[in-house]
Amino acid sequence: MSNEELTERVRGIIAATQHVPKEKITADSTFQELGIDSLDGINILFAVESEFNINIPDDAAQNIRSVRDVIDGIAKLIDAGQGGQAAVRA
Amino acid sequence: MTAASLIEGGAAALCASAGVLAYAVRVPSASLLAPSACRGVRTRPAIALTFDDGPSEATPALLEILARAGVLATFFQCGANVRRLPAITRDVAAAGHEIGNHTDTHPMLQFKPRAYIDREVAAAQETIEQFAGSRPRLFRPPYGIRWFGLAEVQQRHGLTGIMWTTLALDWKLQVHDVASRLMRGAANGAIFCLHDGRGLQPRPDVRVTLEAVRAVLPKLMEQGFHFEKVTDILCPTKN
């Protein structure tokens, strides 16, 4: 899966979870800019874990503050072997 | 395995997956049917007290115990109980406690269609917002039972599912046993599940809950624990 595909899927997840237009979300958006607070963050992580079939460690989750952090975190977990088919599905 | 994949597998697969399904429906940490958090961060000696099924006529006594100890908690309230005792819900909110959604009429969600689950959750959202002044962000299903469709309902209402690390069993055990369970369950990020009501029953007897809470609070504080609302104990991102 390319970085562009991964970014698109993450933007889609955040848009659906937060009920905001996907166009408002860029890879460089911070959670603060998007009005995403701690509880919203939990729901995004739940959705990401479900979509990519990965488990985000608690300590890593605490440091996620932007869309880029989410994308990079997913990429690392996929590179480490998590995700399987869910991670490569376009 | 996702809820969707369970459904797609058909009846045969569902039967074959009975063990998995039971796990998904009842185990607090399972997120197959609806994503839920069941503990806070483990790096701080904080515990979240949660109370389900209120408000009830006993809730003011609990508020007094918590106030004396300087403790804030999270109350998962039923919409029908809030309409019956709105002043108590106002008092809970005014005291600084957090109020979550525990459905409107405390049904078992097992085997219920998504539209039914949505009506239960939506009605409680409206009622709690009307009397507490803010819309809940947290949800706990009655009996801890999650079902297909709940994940979508939670997302639609912007709710985070919350389960627990320790179920006090305060509706059936004696004070000593409830207190023992809580002391054994004390750990960084623990979420305790107790009850200040009994479903929709008026004037429930929750003396065991009150006495157990009164007994364990000072002991846990002596051990170095402090108490936080669920939202504060979770905090996976720092804004």
Image: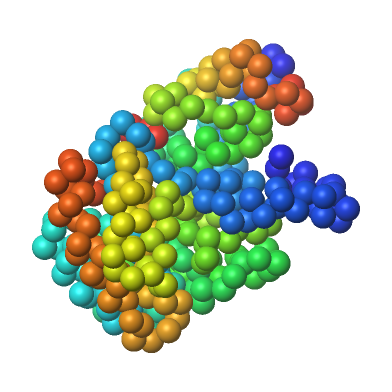
- Residue at 61 percent across and 28 percent down: it is A54
- Front residue of B149 and B191: B191
Furthest toward the left, the residue is: B68
Q: Is residue B15 above or below residue A22?
A: below
- Residue at 64 percent across and 70 percent down: it is B116
Q: Is residue A81 left or right of residue B75?
A: right
Rendered location of residue B210, percent (x, y) = 25, 70
Rendered location of residue B220, percent (x, y) = 21, 49
- Does the rendering let one see residue A72? yes
- Front residue of B37 and B12: B12
- Residue at 73 percent across and 28 percent down: it is A86
Q: How many marks?
A: 0
- Front residue of B109 and B20: B20
Q: Is residue B205 left or right of residue B161?
A: left
Q: Is residue B101 left or right of residue A77?
A: left
Rendered location of residue A53, percent (x, y) = 66, 31
Split into 4 quadrants, where in the image is the C terminus of chain B?
A: top left
Q: Is residue B57 above or below residue A28?
A: below
Q: Is residue B184 above or below residue B109?
A: above
Question: How is this picture coloured?
Answer: rainbow
- Residue at 52 percent across and 56 percent down: it is B157
Split into 4 quadrants, where in the image is the N terminus of chain B?
A: top right
Rendered location of residue B173, percent (x, y) = 38, 69
- Does the rendering let one see residue A4? no
